[in-house]
Amino acid sequence: MSSKLSYYTEEGLKKLKDELQALKSKGRSDMAKQIAEARDKGDLSENAEYDAAKDAQGLLELKISKLEDLVANARVIDESTIDTSKVSILTKVKLQNVANKQTVTYMLVAEEEADLKSGKISVKSPIGKGLLGKKVGDTADINVPAGVVKFEVLDISL
């Protein structure tokens, strides 16, 4: 798999580890029961339920493998080392849409932690990419599905 490092908050890494543990224990247990039930229904060569359960097991194992890779390459960022003079991962950025003067605040996080409802956007999203490295007072022209939006960086904090 990939060996690319990803940076997380402690909370975000804990969620990943909890999900991985649940898939390994309960997920595998439930899958084994499904396969056993399907196997008990007769001839395996013509048993669509058994084939479907085996396919689902393969997908579960793939998901577990990907999560294991993510957790193995995950690092928790020490907030005391974050430079708030420019936009980077785990910084909160207050932006103003230059066109309509609307302000919004986002926290830049790893892709797996992104949650727009709580104001967390991925550093890999168009807005996240467009903001990385910007300083207070800088403007960023960001390509979004609706076109190009110009944002001004008003504040950067933790």
Image (cartoon, rainbow, N blue to C red):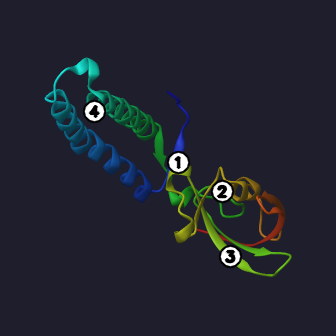
What residue is shown with label 4?
Answer: 49
The residue shown at (68%, 76%) is: 104
Amino acid of disc 3? Val
- Compared with 71, 1 (above or below) is above
The residue shown at (36%, 30%) is: 55
Q: Is residue 14 left or right of residue 47?
A: right
Q: Is residue 111 left or right of residue 131?
A: left
What residue is shown with label 1?
Answer: 7
The answer to which of marks 2 and 1 sits earlier in the sequence is 1
Give the alpha-carbon distance from disc 4 to disc 3, as whole Å. Answer: 49 Å
Q: Position of residue 33 (x, y in %)?
A: 17, 37
- Circles 2 and 3 in contact, beta carbons < 8 Å: no
What residue is shown with label 2?
Answer: 88
Give the alpha-carbon distance from disc 2 to disc 3, as whole Å. Answer: 17 Å
Q: Position of residue 51 (x, y in %)?
A: 31, 27
- Circles 4 and 1 in contact, beta carbons < 8 Å: no
